């Protein structure tokens, strides 16, 4: 059990570099097994999810080692195509290994993935995309067996821009004969990061960032070095913390366009936002105003992963903020915990109404999921007295040294293991 001790903080000030992206790292780690290759990855965050992915790689027969923020992978010795349930259940993104294993081995056997319990997250779009490329897939009580003597390029039309389904289709398509065209593809920056990495591996991929992605095979590469992009959700989290507490914080190394919708609402709340080419500076008095209505949506819309931390920033804002969650039906699990601090939040289905209050008071909370846990930390920074966030490891799945990063900016916080 991890216990986050958080005390009221009046002001955050300073500059920090944003950690490498969790959601970019995980599909890139899976991509390393598409072909036998030696890969050096830089700026990889030290996270529980990354460690889980490395253990999957080692189970499959690869050499996989992390030293600080560098990861070294040699997939030439891959010998297995089966991932046991114990490894699959540790994170949602483990399902991305399915497309990569089919590309490399022509088969894959795994179980349904784990991760935060945010509601129904079926993988039917993943399976449909692979079937259209010629994979035979059998499902039995949560176990999935995939096989294909030959993958064929085809046109895949996704009815919803699923990030995971787009990534799985991209990985498998690198080994397919002919061209694969993914229509209705996800447009998230992590998709573009995966495209760039696959191209560096020798694949022919284009169109990421748009609705249509084209993949047509892969040339052989023996080794490469690659740098993971910064994490836009971590940037959004620190920005929301600075907005809520007040202060002057500069986030370095991040492209403002990757979380522009979050910055837009923080600006609407009264923060001054100064954009640099690879940085964002946020100035806040700590006296925010409500931002009206926020609706989550696939990129370039407002990210569902940033919804809980924006909610936390709005707890003391003047007026009402209304959030409509369109991606996950169970993404307000943090709301009852925030109310224990004195927040005024009403949840009705997919709609949450937050009325700003004058004061919050410290309390003992339980982290319900990764982003919900981060929201509780932000709320704790705004609450009188001490807030304890008890966590079974959700927060460290996605945030590297969040306590140290916030403490360097002036936050009164420490993590007890």
Image (cartoon, helix red, strand yellow):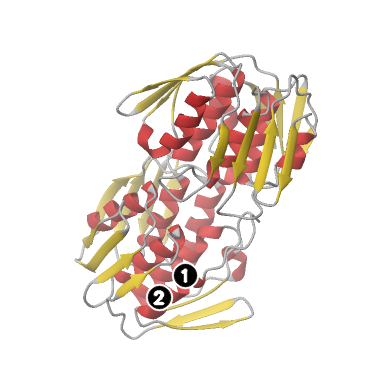
Q: Is residue 308 left or right of residue 153?
A: right
- Against 94, is 254 above or below? above
Residue 216's x, y, as percent? 22, 68
- The answer to which of 279 and 333 lies nearer the viewer is 333
- Against 108, is 248 above or below? above
Residue 212's x, y, as percent? 29, 60
- Of badges 2 and 1, nearer the viewer stands 1
- Against 178, is 184 above or below? above
- The answer to which of 228 and 282 lies nearer the viewer is 282
Element type at mark 2: helix
- Disc ID at residue 125: 1
Q: State if disc 1 and disc 2 touch (CB < 8 Å).
A: no
Q: Is residue 204 left or right of residue 308?
A: left
- Against 306, is 249 above or below? above
- Disc ID at residue 69: none
Q: Is residue 192 left or right of residue 350?
A: left
- On the question of residue 91 being in view, the answer is yes
Q: Residue at x 46, y 80 (%)?
A: 146
């Amino acid at each position: 059990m991890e216990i986050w001790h958080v005390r009221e903080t009046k002001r955050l000030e300073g500059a920090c570099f944003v950690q490498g992206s969790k959601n970019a790292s995980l599909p890139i780690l899976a991509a390393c097994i598409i072909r036998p290759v030696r890969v050096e990855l830089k700026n990889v965050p030290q996270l529980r999810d990354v460690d889980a992915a490395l253990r999957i790689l080692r189970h499959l027969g690869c050499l996989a080692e992390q030293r600080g923020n560098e990861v070294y992978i040699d997939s030439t010795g891959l010998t297995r195509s089966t991932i046991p349930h114990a490894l699959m259940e540790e994170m949602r993104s483990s399902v991305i290994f399915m497309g990569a294993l089919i590309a490399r081995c022509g088969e894959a056997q795994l179980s349904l993935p784990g991760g935060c319990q945010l509601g129904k997250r079926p993988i039917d779009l993943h399976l449909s995309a692979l079937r259209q490329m010629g994979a035979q897939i059998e499902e039995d009580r949560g176990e999935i067996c995939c096989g294909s003597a030959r993958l064929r390029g085809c046109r895949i039309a996704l009815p919803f821009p699923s990030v995971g389904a787009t990534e799985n289709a991209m990985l498998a398509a690198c080994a397919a004969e002919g061209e694969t065209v993914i229509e209705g593809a996800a447009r998230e920056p992590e998709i573009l990061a995966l495209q760039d990495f696959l191209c560096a591996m020798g694949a022919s991929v284009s169109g990421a960032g748009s609705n249509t992605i084209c993949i047509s095979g892969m040339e052989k590469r023996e080794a490469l070095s690659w740098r993971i992009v910064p994490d836009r959700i971590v940037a959004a989290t620190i920005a929301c913390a600075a907005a809520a507490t007040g202060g002057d914080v500069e986030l370095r190394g991040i492209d403002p366009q990757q979380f522009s919708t979050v910055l837009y609402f923080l600006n609407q709340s009264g923060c001054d936002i100064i954009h640099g080419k690879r940085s964002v500076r946020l100035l806040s008095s700590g006296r925010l105003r409500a931002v009206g209505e926020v609706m989550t949506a696939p990129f370039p819309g407002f990210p569902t992963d940033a919804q809980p931390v924006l909610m936390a920033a709005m707890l003391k804002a003047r007026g009402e903020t209304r959030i409509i969650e369109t991606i996950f039906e169970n993404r307000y699990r943090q709301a009852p915990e925030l109310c224990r601090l004195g927040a005024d939040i009403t949840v009705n289905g997919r709609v949450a109404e937050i009325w700003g209050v004058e004061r919050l008071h410290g309390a003992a909370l339980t982290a319900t999921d990764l982003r919900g846990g981060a929201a509780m930390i932000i709320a704790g920074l705004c609450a009188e007295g001490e807030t304890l966030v008890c966590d079974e490891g959700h927060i460290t799945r996605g945030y590297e040294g969040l306590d140290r990063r916030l403490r360097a900016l002036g936050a009164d916080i420490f993590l007890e293991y």
